[in-house]
Amino acid sequence: MNAYQELTRRHQRIYRLGHLQSIASWDQSANMPEKGAEARAAALAEMGGLLHELATAPEWPGLLAQAAAEPLDDEQRASVREMQRHWRASNALPQQLVESLSLASSRCEHAWRTQRHANDWDGHRPMLQEVVKLVREAAQHLSQAGGLSRYDALLDQHEPGMRAAELERVFGDLKSWLPGLIQEVQAHQSTQTVLTPVGPFPVAAQRELGRAVMGLMGFDFEAGRLDESAHPFCGGVPEDVRMTTRYNETEPLTALMGVIHETGHGRYEQNLPRHWLGLPMAQARSMGLHESQSLSFEMQLGSHPGFAAQLSPLLQQHLGAQPAFEPANLHRLLTRVQPGYIRVDADEVTYPAHVILRFEIERALVEDEIEVDDIPALWDAKMQQLLGLSTVGNFKNGCMQDVHWPAGLFGYFPCYTLGAMYAAQFFAAMRREMPDLDERIGRGELQPVFDWLRSRIWSQGSRWDTAELVRRASGETLNPAHFQAHLRARYLG
């Protein structure tokens, strides 16, 4: 066995144990009884420590050096590059810190579920402070190992190669035109008549509707499932994708669009390259690209006027016929622009404001410029500035609404808007190659979209760095102009 083969064997063992960790984490959010929380947190911390120990064994540097000198083909060399990147990130963190952060974030995330519902910021704050303390410590280790700022080091874990300075440039441009666009679209839509669906809409019917739409969008139910959780997410592994959503019996479209969003994540995972499975190169390249797939499904397709015509009969079949579900009205419902408190319920136009707010707060938090106690006031000030809404005293719909910070995920939020930009760029490229794409979507011909995404994005895994993958897929690296053009065309065209 040469060094590359030994590295492959080790990575595949880590992957198999990570499979169990992922399913246990999904179960923690979807099925676990209340009294299992402390034991599950300890088990996940134990598994996190074991995986870290395996990923930082003393033999790794020698094996990586030997493999780099072996006669490998281009794919294998790309695989070694990704192995080296993963080893550097793992080796930067002490095992005790990995276990402590896993335990603290599991406890904080579990408590958040009830604390958020109770609007209990005072109860939540000390647990979040412990998570932030450990996240800062991890960021410091990663910063020293990679020669990056602390926030850039965390951002690099989710969006390799992206830097806060570039985000400030991109988001700064967004902030210069987004408020005006929001007002322009609202004025444009103020003349439209929109019918609101009349419920109630039983959860069982919504669940079956979601499954029907997942089938329409090509989800493989023999390699995944849909469940319910406090916060929608997609987890599991490519062979066993676990998606969740949450339901509201008075309003069915939020849950449905959540399912469509997660189906984009799920199809990406299900179509990652199986011949590299178990290796870092078989993983999604970045969370920005992952979000580009969920937003390709939810926004580029899901909010397309032609797709509304495909959704309409399914809604009427599962939830009952009513004028609100007619295609034209349904499309107006799906593209209604109205500033609101909740990020996951936000429309496509106001959504970036939610991301900019979180980016600015979490960057300052990680860099020690603010403390956890400062979050509510900053959140309120930025919500008023960006969306004209106050969250004073409204913690559950303000700074406690997301699971990311309780779960220790800092540096993730920018990926949502980067994903929206990538998705707009990919669909612009599709339209250049398929000028009749919109007509085909209107006829229910979705396979050309899926085939394009499979060949350009899904099947590539981490074969290329993000900029190169995007260039190969669309003909250019990230160009935010496509996102602005998409919004103006859809909402004002």
Image (cartoon, rainbow, N blue to C red):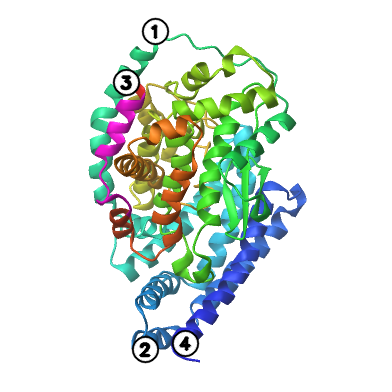
Badge 1 element:
loop
Badge 2 element:
loop
Q: Which mark is residue 141?
A: none
Look at the image and give the residue range highlighted in magenta.
473-490
Viewer-proximal residue among 318 and 344 = 318
Amino acid under label 1?
Answer: Thr
Query: Residue beneath label 2, please?
Result: 70
Q: CA distance from mark 2 to mark 4?
A: 17 Å
Amino acid under label 2?
Answer: Glu
Q: Eyeballing the image, is 2 above or below 259?
A: below
Viewer-proximal residue among 378 and 422 = 422
Query: Residue beneath label 3, please?
Result: 492
Residue at 69 percent across and 35 percent down: it is 207
Query: Residue beneath label 1, please?
Result: 191
Q: Let me know if residue 475 is in the magenta part.
A: yes
Q: Is residue 378 visible to us here?
A: no
Viewer-proximal residue among 29 and 469 = 469
Tell me if label 2 and label 4 are in contact, CB under 8 Å.
no
Query: Residue beneath label 4, please?
Result: 59
Disc tally is 4
| x and y percentages locating residue 158 in the rendered image | 41, 56
| Mark 2 or mark 3, earlier in chain | 2
222 left or right, relative to 454: right
The quadrant the C terminus occupies is: top left
| Mark 3 or mark 1, earlier in chain | 1
Q: CA distance from mark 4 to mark 3?
A: 59 Å
Tell me if label 2 and label 3 are in contact, CB under 8 Å.
no
Residue at 58 percent across and 41 percent down: it is 232
Viewer-proximal residue among 407 and 459 = 459
